[in-house]
Amino acid sequence: TFNAAISACEKAGRWEHALELLRGIVEDALTPDVISYSAAISACEKADEWRRVFELVADMQLNTVQASVVAYTAAIAACERCGQWRLVLVLLAEMREQRHRPDPVAYAAAASACERAGRRQLVLGLAERTRSRGEALLMLGGA
């Protein structure tokens, strides 16, 4: 299946092939599902292709495919690693709008992106949000 092939590309670090396979689904008049998109997002995230990750999340929304927590977290992680703190916050807000509960990894990546950008107040806001949920804010990479 396409999903298995996209997942194999993700594991092999072949993000370009993962995207080709995703396009192949559409060309074959099929509809990609959350698994297809999540695997492609994860492949691009691992390659620090944050623009492509962000485009894939937008494509999911256009195709009315509900993004999963895994897809959003991978997108947030990709944007964090590339210093895209504003996009991280956009994705975190979208995640909540979709009624997904951001996991500790998503919050940690968001806090790390804000910390690296010198946005201390945003880090404190994220810490407060996690505290209000009864969780601690984990920090990635010693941030």
Image (spheres, rainbow, N blue to C red):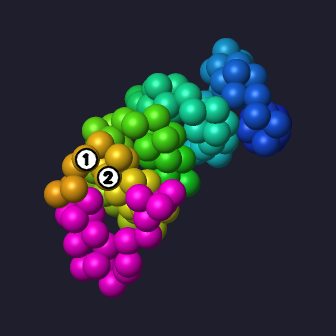
Camera-side residue of 127 and 35: 127
Residue 90 at what x, y percent from top left?
Answer: 29, 42
Boundaries of the magenta span: 123-143
Residue 7 at what x, y percent from top left?
Answer: 76, 41
Picture layout, residue 124 above or below residue 93: below
Q: Which residue type does callout 2 highlight?
A: Glu
Residue denoted by label 1: 118
Q: Which residue type does callout 1 highlight?
A: Gly
Label drawn at residue 115? 2
Q: Is residue 13 left or right of residue 74?
A: right
Q: Is residue 122 left or right of residue 33?
A: left
Q: Is residue 68 magenta?
A: no
Picture layout, residue 55 above or below residue 122: above
Name, please, the residue furthest toward the top: 27
Residue at 40% over, 37% down? 83
Q: Is residue 119 left or right of residue 133?
A: left
Residue 27 at what x, y percent from top left?
Answer: 67, 15
Determine whether label 2 and label 1 are within 8 Å by CB. yes
| Structural crowding at the residue carrying mark 1, measured as other residues with C-alpha within 10 Å and reported as few (<14), some (14–19) or many (≥20) | few
Residue at 32% over, 52% down? 115
